[in-house]
Each structure stands twice: as structure tokens, then as C-alpha cells.
């Protein structure tokens, strides 16, 4: 009997050891990733579904679900076309960098259980599914990390594009080969639409205070509360908000407002410092800020930027790297855009005015709506005003106003990530 037990134990160990070896297998390379989750809230903290899939000026070589590349079947974005999709979050421009002292091959796959991957580059080996009801994923398969000295021509289009700012790092080039075609880049790029609750609720009050509520499971760090209006802005910083805790902060008053150029300069520095503290290399942090500074720091409105806990990122976006790196850093920024109560009220007034029979009154309503500075979040504000069961007439006029605002807006090329 003892001999039988020894044999069972020995055979179990022989089976388990290779599995443990595989699970712990790492190689001498580093992987770093940054990205952003953007959500919209009303002044009462309600998370608002919004349509983040409006026109984009991503380079044309970037793949998407309707144009996935040779050999891959095009699929829908989830609920009809991308332009008709309303989501709770826009997963904006994650990029994965690799650092290695020699050439090596790594298999890379990312899952998005509560969302849908919508764009990526280089070309993926496989992606799925076709709708939000199933779990989404993106599988690049075997990715070659080039040697540090390797040089190769990267895709580039004549039009300026913020996509290219992410290349300004010391990361190795990566190569993905599909049949006879090979594609080179400085990173792996992807983005998508998410349907999950946000860990942060933001409740502004009329007396210049904001209550920050961390309703998530992990601590939030480096919370920047920005309010931008009329070409000026204020910055309020809160270093740490523990899980399941509330904290009230006093916003910097209007007398402390600084010209927008000064605010952008200060936030570029402070945000890059915060991202570096969380694990990014300085050039990576600077490239992330350069990609996003106009959207984060210049757009009119009230917003909170914060660093999402690493465990939350791993849960939202499980990343598989085989073999595993000796070091990995995943730094994601949460952006909570807040539609303040006075902005909602002003928007409601303009919708009512747009019902006037006088064309001059309607044109004035269009101009005043544009001056609210809601930008791509205007549809979210309208959605909140409409409520769950709007009257058909009110809904029709609200959308007519938005369409008129977009049609008559001054021509401007805007990157929507």
C-alpha cells in the first residue's frame, strides 16, 4: 500500500512540475502598456450611455471590425453600425510596448469581457465576437520583438495625426507577419467600447465643492479635477481615494483660473510625473500625455482624470503574454466627464427655443448650444435630458438641434479616439 501511495505522489509531482514550470516561465523582456477609459456622468453621478463612435481621423492603415484585413471576416460592432452604438465607456488607444536586448517572439492576446474591441494595428490573427452578448478578444498570435538596433520603415500618412505620438519612446519595433505580408510598428495598438460600471462617481455642488465617491474595489490615485471654461481653467489635485470611500474637495475658485496655455503646460508636466510614478518610463508617459493633452486639458467642461488600479485593469482587460515578461506595467487613466447642472439647464432651454417658428430664434439656439462646449459629449447630455420615455416631439427637436449644430459647426479636424 505504501508503495502504491509513493507511486501516486511521484506521478502527481511529475505531472504538476511541468505545469508549474510553464506557469512560471518568464523571459528577459519588459512589457509596458497605457490606455484610457472615458465615461460621461450627469451632475447627480448617473453614468450616461453615449455614442463614442463618431467620425475619426485614425490613419487609414488601422484595422477595424468592418475592415479587419485579408482572411478575416468582417463583423458588426455590436448594435448595428458603429455610428449607432451607445456604450458606457470608450476604451481609447491602449498601446503595448516591448523592450528586449535581443530578438524574440511573444504570443499576445487581449480579452475584453465587458466590451468589444473595435480597432487595432498591426493586423490580428483573430478577433471576436460579433456582438456585445459574447466576450470580445483580439489575438495577434506570434509577435516578433525586433532587436534593439533593428530599423524598419513604419507606416506613415501625410496628414498629421496624434496616433504617431505614441512612437516617441525607446521601445523595440514589433513585427507581425501574415502570409507574405509583414507589418512593423513601435507598439501594438487597439481600442474598443465598454459596458461596465465606473469606479468613480463625481458629484459637484453649487458652492464650488465636488464629492468624489470611489465605488470600486481598489484605491484610485492621482485624481485631477479640471474645470475649463471661456479659455481659462482651474486644477484641483487629490492624491489618493481609498476603495469604498468618499471625499469632498473644494475646487479652485475662478480667481485662481489660469489661461488655457498655462494650464496645459502645467498639466502636461504633472500628469507625466504621475504616470511615471505608476510604472511607465518617462518617454512613455510623455507620449501618452502628448497623445491626449488637447482632449484632456483643453476641452470645455468639468472632468476628473485618475489612475485606475492595476488589478481593475487586469480584470477589465485580461492580457496574455507567452512567455511572460520579467516586468510588466499597465497604466490606465480613467476620464470621467461631468455634465454640470447649469449646462443641462442651458441645453434644455436651447431645445425649447429650437421649437420656435422664427428661424432667427432657432439659429440662435444652435449657436448657443455649440457655445456650451459639449463637443462629442452632446449626445450624452441630450440622452440624459430625454430620460427613459421622452415625448416623440421633444426627442425629435432635440436631435434636430444636435444635427443642426454639427452641420453648421466651423470646419475643424478633430481626433476622436
Image (tube, helix red, strand yellow):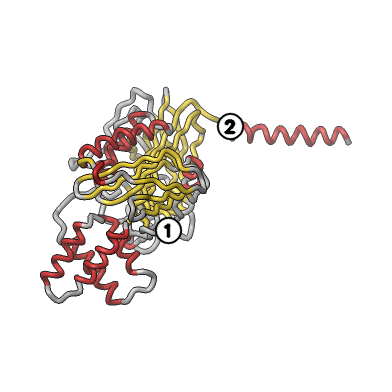
Foreground pick, 255 / 40: 255
Picture residue at 48% right of the left edge, 25% below the top: 28
Task: Looking at the image, tell me whether mark 1 or mark 2 is earlier in sequence order.
Answer: 2
Please provide percent x and percent y for residue 190: 37, 45
Quickly name the residue at label 2. 24
Foreground pick, 356 / 127: 356
Neighbours of disc 2 within 10 Å: few (<14), some (14-19), many (20+) = few
Quadrant of residue 5 in the image? Answer: top right
Foreground pick, 232 / 221: 232
Picture residue at 26% right of the left edge, 69% below the top: 398
Quadrant of residue 189 in the image? Answer: top left
**In the drawing, does residue 270 fall left or right of residue 261?**
right
Compared to 4, does 195 lie above or below? Answer: below
Quadrant of the frame with the N terminus: top right
Please provide percent x and percent y for residue 176: 38, 38
Neighbours of disc 1 within 10 Å: few (<14), some (14-19), many (20+) = some
Please provide percent x and percent y for residue 303: 33, 49
Quickly name the residue at label 1. 130
Amino acid at each position: 500500500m505504501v508503495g502504491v501511495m509513493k507511486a501516486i505522489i511521484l506521478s502527481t509531482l511529475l505531472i504538476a512540475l511541468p505545469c508549474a514550470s510553464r506557469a512560471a516561465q518568464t523571459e528577459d523582456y519588459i512589457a509596458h502598456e497605457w490606455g484610457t477609459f472615458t465615461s460621461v456622468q450627469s451632475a447627480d453621478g448617473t453614468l450616461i450611455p453615449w455614442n463614442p463612435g463618431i467620425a475619426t481621423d485614425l490613419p487609414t492603415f488601422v484595422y477595424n471590425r468592418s475592415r479587419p484585413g485579408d482572411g478575416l471576416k468582417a463583423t458588426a460592432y455590436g448594435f448595428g453600425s458603429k455610428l449607432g452604438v451607445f456604450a458606457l465607456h470608450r476604451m481609447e488607444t491602449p498601446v503595448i510596448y516591448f523592450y528586449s536586448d535581443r530578438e524574440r517572439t511573444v504570443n499576445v492576446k487581449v480579452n475584453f469581457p465587458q466590451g468589444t474591441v473595435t480597432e487595432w494595428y498591426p493586423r490580428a490573427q483573430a478577433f471576436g465576437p460579433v456582438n456585445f452578448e459574447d466576450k470580445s478578444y483580439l489575438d495577434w498570435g506570434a509577435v516578433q520583438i525586433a532587436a534593439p538596433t533593428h530599423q524598419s520603415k513604419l507606416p506613415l500618412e501625410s496628414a498629421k495625426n496624434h496616433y504617431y505620438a505614441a512612437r516617441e519612446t525607446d521601445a523595440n519595433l514589433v513585427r507581425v507577419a501574415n502570409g507574405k505580408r509583414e507589418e512593423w510598428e513601435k507598439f501594438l495598438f487597439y481600442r474598443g467600447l465598454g459596458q461596465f460600471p465606473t469606479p468613480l462617481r463625481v458629484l459637484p455642488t453649487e458652492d464650488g465643492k465636488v464629492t468624489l465617491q470611489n465605488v470600486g474595489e481598489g484605491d484610485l490615485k492621482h485624481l485631477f479635477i479640471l474645470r475649463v471654461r471661456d479659455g481659462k481653467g482651474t486644477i484641483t489635485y487629490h492624491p489618493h481615494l481609498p476603495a469604498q470611500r468618499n471625499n469632498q474637495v473644494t475646487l479652485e475658485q475662478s480667481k485662481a483660473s489660469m489661461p488655457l496655455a498655462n494650464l496645459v503646460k502645467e498639466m502636461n508636466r504633472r500628469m507625466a510625473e504621475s504616470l511615471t510614478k505608476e510604472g511607465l518610463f518617462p518617454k512613455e508617459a510623455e507620449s501618452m500625455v502628448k497623445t491626449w493633452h488637447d482632449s484632456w486639458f483643453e476641452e470645455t467642461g468639468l472632468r476628473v482624470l485618475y489612475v485606475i488600479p492595476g488589478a481593475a485593469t487586469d480584470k477589465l482587460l485580461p492580457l496574455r503574454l507567452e512567455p511572460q515578461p520579467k516586468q510588466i506595467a499597465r497604466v490606465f487613466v480613467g476620464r470621467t466627464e461631468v455634465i454640470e447642472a447649469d449646462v443641462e439647464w442651458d441645453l434644455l432651454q436651447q431645445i425649447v427655443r429650437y421649437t420656435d417658428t422664427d428661424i432667427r430664434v432657432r439659429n440662435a439656439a444652435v449657436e448657443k448650444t455649440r457655445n456650451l462646449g459639449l463637443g462629442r459629449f452632446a449626445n450624452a447630455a441630450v440622452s440624459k435630458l430625454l430620460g427613459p420615455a421622452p415625448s416623440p416631439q421633444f426627442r425629435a427637436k432635440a436631435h434636430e438641434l444636435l444635427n443642426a449644430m454639427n452641420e453648421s459647426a466651423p470646419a475643424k479636424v478633430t481626433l476622436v479616439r
